[in-house]
Structures are given as structure tokens and as C-alpha cells.
Amino acid sequence: MAECHLQVRNLSVWYGERQALKNVSIDIPDRKITAIIGPSGCGKTTLLRCMNRLVETNDKTRVDGEVLVDGENIHSNRVDPIRIRTKMGLLAQRPQVLPMSIYDNVAYGPRIHGEHRHAELDSIVERYLRVASLWEEVHDRLRSPASGLSIGQQQRLCLARGLAVNPEIILGDEPTSSLDPKSSQNVEQLLADLRKDYTIVLVTHILRQARRIADHIVFLYLGEVIETGPMKEFFSNPRQDLTRQYIEGTIS
């Protein structure tokens, strides 16, 4: 197993009486893309939302177990969830741009954290729009509303906004599901390029996507981890019969 600073230990989650995750324990490799796969309703998004404490926004949720970032249990009552979310850049299924300009979307996080120097903000905005392969498309309309961008451009803007606060980890909840094929390809390529600098955890229901860009796979079924492992080994030589059936499409 590669070095990791994100670990899940004995994690169980309930929404009211329904148990969504059952005693999940996994290690997420550092500076790799880990894809969480499995049928709809198996707990993929719940697991992802536990990694930045968004799961607790539902007041009927109960969480047992630990999610460790650099050895710290982020679900401890002593931990500030805002600080944890700063470490985690999140890409949702549909891009959620802020109701402000393209420039202000990227500058929003740095301003919240106390950066108000115009020259530095200009540099941050350009740097991360370039990282998101968006600068050449928008540099002449930075003060225009972000809502005027295409859906694919909005998703890349959300990525730039998330990176502008220097996260350690990028979380993606099916971030290409609402995009056209070209925009999906752009986001996949960006994530592949970013893995040299970031740990990336990606929920996807598309096995082809997991094969294309993932280094490591976590397979969930009915809230339980069935199998984890390097991508090539996972798909070419699954250890569990349930894994083989899912890959072959005989269960869904």
C-alpha cells in the first residue's frame, strides 16, 4: 500500500433507522486517484461526505468510527469542521458556482482566509484558472457572472475555486455526471494531472471511468467494503465473487 494520510476506521453511518455504512475500514493512498464504485444506494456518497463532515448536515445522521486525516479523527467533537473542509476541495455532481463573478468565485476562499491584497488575489485567480484549463477561455471576462459559463466551464471553475484554498485532498462526487463527453474528458484529464500534487477520492458509477483514471479502487456493496486494491489488479484479477459479478454486470 502506498503512503496515505487519509484513513477510515470502523466507520458506520445511520440515517435514522437505516444503516448506510457498515464498519468500513480503508486506507486512501497519498497522491493517487482512488475511485469508490458500487451500485446506486450502496453508500458511496455517504462515505465521501464523511471525509469532510458534510454527512452531519442531516440532523438524523449518526456516525460511529473514525475518519483520520494525518492521524487526527476529524469526527471528534474537538475538531472544527470548517478547518477540515478547508483541507478538502469538493466537486459535486452538478457545479455549484457562487452568485458572483468568475474572478470572485476563485478569490472567495482566499478572501475568507484573510488575503485582501489585490496583486496577490490577481495572481491566485490566474494561477488556478490556468490549473483548471480555464484561463484562456475566460481571461477577458473575469468580471462577468460565473452563471454565464457553460456547465463544463462551471465545473472547472468549481475546481479552481476549491484549489485556491490549498487543500490537501480533492473529493469528487460523480463530478462528470452532468457533463457532455468533451467536458467530461476535460475534467478527467485535469484530475489525472492533479494527482501528482493531491490525494483524490472520486465517486463514480462508470466502470470505464474508473479504469481510465483511477490508481486504486474501493468497491462498496450494501454499505460494506467488498474489495479494495490497485486498479489493474482489481479489474483483471478480482478476489471476491461479488466483485467479479459486478464487473461483469451480472449484479447492479
Image: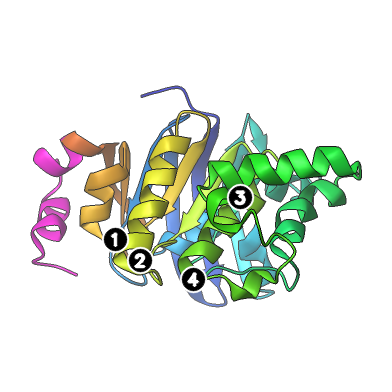
Q: Secondary structure at mark 4?
A: helix
* Amino acid under disc 3: Ala
Q: Residues within 10 Å of mark 3 (few under 14, many from 20)?
A: many
Q: CA distance from mark 2 to mark 1?
A: 6 Å
* Amino acid under disc 1: Gly
The residue labelled by disc 1 is 38
Give the vertical position of 53 relative to 233 (above or below). Answer: below
* Amino acid under disc 4: Ile
Observer-nearest of 189 and 199 = 189
* Amino acid under disc 2: Cys
Horizontal and vertical percent for residue 98?
A: 71, 69
Q: Secondary structure at mark 2?
A: loop
Q: Earlier in the sequence, mark 3 or mark 1?
A: 1
Residue 42 is labelled as 2
Residue 160 is labelled as 3
Residue at 37%, 45% in the rendered image = 189
Q: Earlier in the sequence, mark 3 or mark 4?
A: 4
Residue at 85%, 39% in the rendered image = 119
Q: Are marks 3 and 1 in contact (CB under 8 Å)?
A: no
Q: Secondary structure at mark 3?
A: helix
Q: CA distance from mark 3 to mark 2?
A: 30 Å
The residue labelled by disc 4 is 151
Q: Are marks 2 and 1 in contact (CB under 8 Å)?
A: yes
Q: Which residues are magenta?
A: 233-252
